[in-house]
Amino acid sequence: MDHRSSTRSARRPLTAALAAALTTGLAVTTAVAPGLAPGGGEAVAAPRHEDKIPMAVGYGGAISTVDPEASRIGLEVLRKGGNAVDAAVAAAAALGVTEPYSAGIGGGGFFLHYDAATGEVTTIDGRETAPAAMPTDAFIDPSTGAPYRFSPELVTSGVSVGTPGTPATWEVALERWGTLSLAQALKPATQLARRGFVVDQTFRSQTLDNAARFSAFPATAELFLPGGDAPAVGTLFRNRDLAATYDLLAKHGTEAFYTGDIAEDVVEAVTNPATDPDTDLPVPPGYLALEDLAGYEALVQDPTHVRYREFDVYGMGPPSSGGSTVGEALNILETFDLPGMSDADYLHHYLEASALSFADRGKYLGDAAFVDVPLETLLSDDFAAERACLIDPTTALPKPVAPGDVDATSSACGETASPEEMDTENISTTNLTVVDGEGNVVEYTLTIEQTGGSGMVVPGRGFLLNNELTDFSLRWSASDPNRIEPGKRPRSSMAPTLVLRDGEPVLALGSPGGSTIITTVLQTLTNRLDRGMDVAEALSAPRATQRNTASVVAEPEFIELYGDALFAYGHALVASGDQFTSAAEIGAATAIEIGPDGLLTAVSEPRRRGGGAAMVLEPVSP
């Protein structure tokens, strides 16, 4: 069959759905229902905001986030002369207000920056760190000797809280590349927290999903479960405590977060959790100390880099595995003619390359300050060729596959090492993409780990603490690169990614989704660069994720379109994952494509996680 006709027929239902979303947008209600704002107070007029329109085309600057308030704030910063970094920090602070279950100053993230004046790509590692007193058996149930990683005891506890890196990330980014002060960048989000935003169904649903955990903490319940229930859709949600916290950061800088009263409140919340006396949920204390906060640093580091066909692809290095795993998979796929394949052949190769690179991720990736990560080998064409030769064009490899041997002295196909630990990363997080009128680019992925983080709001401060330390491996092993160690940063899959052609940026993208971030970015890249989809189609296409597991977790539409064809190769597709992997929706990406004439195409999800909001300064008809 001609691959072109196969591609066209397979995309037809997707394109129709996308066209409908782009035409109508995903409207956000502007009506405010009668009643009180959370914590009491009067109902007020609805705040201004935009509908969730998932694509915008134009010039002068663009932004894409999951939230219209955050996108509007970032766009306004650009409109007033701020650059991409200024807009990214302002939008991220706004997401801490409107997306508090996915992001905020109680968490961390990874920040990728392209400097149009110098052509340099640089990243900031704002990952959380393990406390100095963190024991190696923190995730082991002493009564059984078995890991209790997925139990409430660790997911909702002080044990899971790492030293937050987000405030330091903002400060470093603004000091290196921004034109605004931290106070100026925080001002719009501070106003947003005070005046409130309109609750949508996603916010209410996420609150209800966490109700059992949130109700265990009086401070969390007071903020997010006023009167014992999640805020109703259409009502106004305010967070005056967070506004006051932002005010302190604006006045005193991040020193106000990492030392002083806020730091003391964070440590108290972690080491002596205040719980409801009626809760049945055990909440063991954690190990965070004032010294951990005072000593935290956001690290400026080089990106990963691979050459993929005529493109240069930059990503995030360790402790994130995003850049290396996406890069290795691209190197593997470069050995095949993806544009000339049928849809089924292409997807088979995509899934196999993903499984092979995930095997190597598990074996070798960790915090490079603590373990020797063979990054140069993992991203080399020679290593990719050794891995690619294992792919049978007609038959799926038995899963899990073994990792490659980076120390092999020969180039024999299929040399492998011992297998890796099971993946434990969570699916929440959020992502934003910004391009300014000068051509500077920011791709930023930030998180507090699972939806709702640890469930613990710092009393009087208005933000949730992360449960990021659950990204460490369950059991401690001296050979495991992701073993727990004091001061170490747990392995991540966050993959802010930038694509250049002839030295100029052409595409920036990223996604939330735990370890599915890697496959979301990889699939979107190959959709766009190899399969002839435009950027909106590439991002919206139904997804599947193969993370070196026996079955491929896939969205229902993907199974409907490709399930039978891929089954013939031996791929088992399932639409049910574990509690941290929603098969119904994989990822919630944002992207901006930069055309040769400066035309910007900003895109976000038209449907996943309630849709996103893409905006440009000077719109034109797409």
Image (cartoon, helix red, strand yellow):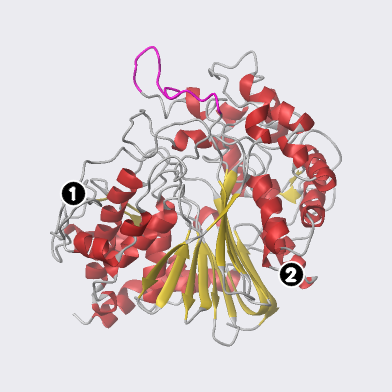
Q: Secondary structure at mark 2?
A: helix
Of residues 289 and 54, the one drawn nearer to the viewer in this rendering: 289
- Report the residue marked by disc 1: 416
Near mark 1 (Cα within 10 A), the count class, few <14, some 14-19 or many ≥20, is some
Q: Quadrant of residue 444?
A: bottom right
Quarter of the picture containing the N terminus is bottom left
- Report the residue marked by disc 2: 78
Q: Secondary structure at mark 1?
A: loop
Dot 1 and dot 2 residues touching (CB under 8 Å): no
Q: Position of residue 311 (x, y in %)?
A: 41, 76
Magenta stretch bounds: 132-146
Q: Is residue 166 left or right of residue 179?
A: left
The answer to whether residue 488 is above or below residue 140 is below
Quarter of the picture containing the C terminus is bottom right
Q: Is residue 381 left or right of residue 215?
A: left
Does the magenta-highlighted stretch encompass residue 245? no
The answer to whether residue 235 is above or below residue 380 is above
Residue ID at (30%, 76%)? 7
